[in-house]
Amino acid sequence: MKVNFSMWKKALSTLVKMDSKEEWDELDVVSKWLIATRSAVTIVTLYSCAIGGLLAIRHGYFNDNWGMSILAWVIVTLGLFIAHGTNNFLNDYTDFARGVDTESYFRTQYSVHPLIQKFWSKEQQFRWFAISGTLAMLAGLFALFYTHFSLDIIILFAVGALVLLFYTWPLKHIALGELSIFLIWGPIIVAAVFLVLARGSTEHVWPVALAAVPWGLSVVSINLGKHIDKAPEDKKKMVGTLPVVIGEKAARITNIILLALIYLFILYLVFISRYFSPILLIVFFAGQRMLYAIGVHTKPRPAEPPQDWPYWPTWFAGFTFYHNRLFSNLLLIAILIDTLLRLFLPGFWPAQ
């Protein structure tokens, strides 16, 4: 079995669809894990962790021991990334066992589903889940020892674990899945990583959590877009996502508001709270993609895929994902530059 680095790159950048079990069996372990956990989406966890780490550097928590701080940052980041993938294993297993995921269901049309496609058995899926979960747990234990079992870290990890475990059921079924996505990949993960690297110090944790709001809104816009796309199928399956509960039009309006709030909150963080400098306005270069996404949300989903649209059956999610990819990279670059400027030019944009 040859290590397929090109497949690693592909799986981290786009959802992979594969129909041949023979092709699947030839893949290396990492490629299978990345594809089965839909790493093109779970990569958002790496961005959340990167933001939390950069803000910890900004507030001086790397100064005493850069080597150990970077090691801790890497371990926690990998642990949370693996935990996100572990949750996706659990989601697929649960939905498959409950009869939600079937060959004709929306989920199986845009990426590999090893259980539906019989690439492996339920027992094998559970083993992948168990191994991934163990690795994630070891990273969590490291974080607890690193912070001397900080109560705040324990609470954040417990909340995050509970939301991850109960996202597929019941949260997604009672229109709380979208809110959970925003909280976890926005304020909670960013604040948790920050707190670990701050060794449990809560001095700056609330401004850090607020700084993560635009990123969380960007992530949930993808999730809500996907749920709008598959609302008809979810309604038949009695999966009560937010679009199913409030209707497609209201959900489209909600996502338009979320997309606009991303940029309004950026302006708040720069000019009102002054937590960030105007460097953060770099993210407005993603504004054109945001307007594309908003424009698409003003109309119902087309009954058939437009010509040359490669991402069907996703539609709204395709545009929000397209926006998120540029926005996320610009946001990370902006926070990095902002952090470096504050390190080398202290006081150049003082917070109020």
Image (cartoon, helix red, strand yellow):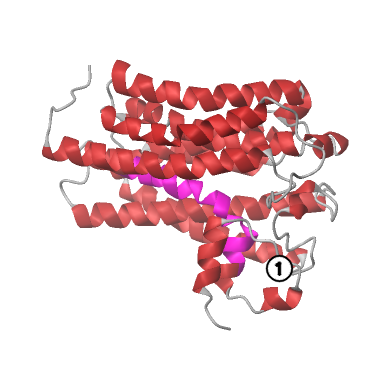
Q: Is residue 253 above or below residue 51?
A: above
Query: Quick check: can you spot residue 321?
Result: yes
- In the current view of this chain or complex, which residue is farthest to the bottom? 1
Whether 54 is among the magenta residues is no
- Mark 1 burial class by Cα count in 10 Å: few <14, some 14-19, many 20+: few
Q: Is residue 181 above or below residue 136?
A: above
- Which x, y percent locates residue 68? 24, 56
- Quarter of the image with the N terminus in it: bottom right
The residue located at (62%, 38%) in the rendering is 223
Q: Is residue 119 above or below residue 130?
A: below
Left or right placement of residue 89 versus residue 97 in this view: left
The residue located at (52%, 32%) in the rendering is 290
Front in this rendered view, residue 238 or 350: 350
The residue located at (56%, 54%) in the rendering is 40
Element type at mark 1: helix
Residue 244 falls in image quadrant: top right
- The region drawn magenta spans 32-53
Question: Which residue is labeled 1 in the image?
Answer: 124
Residue 299 falls in image quadrant: top right
- Which x, y percent locates residue 45? 48, 47
The residue located at (78%, 36%) in the rendering is 302
- Which x, y percent locates residue 38? 61, 55
Q: How many marks?
A: 1
Query: Quick check: can you spot residue 203?
Result: no
- In the current view of this chain or complex, which residue is farthest to the front? 307
What amino acid type should be assigned to the residue bearing mark 1?
Gln
Residue 233 falls in image quadrant: top right
- Quarter of the image with the C terminus in it: top left
Left or right placement of residue 156 versus residue 100 in this view: left
Whether 49 is among the magenta residues is yes
State whether the magenta stretch is mostly helix, strand or loop.
helix
- In the current view of this chain or complex, which residue is farthest to the right? 236
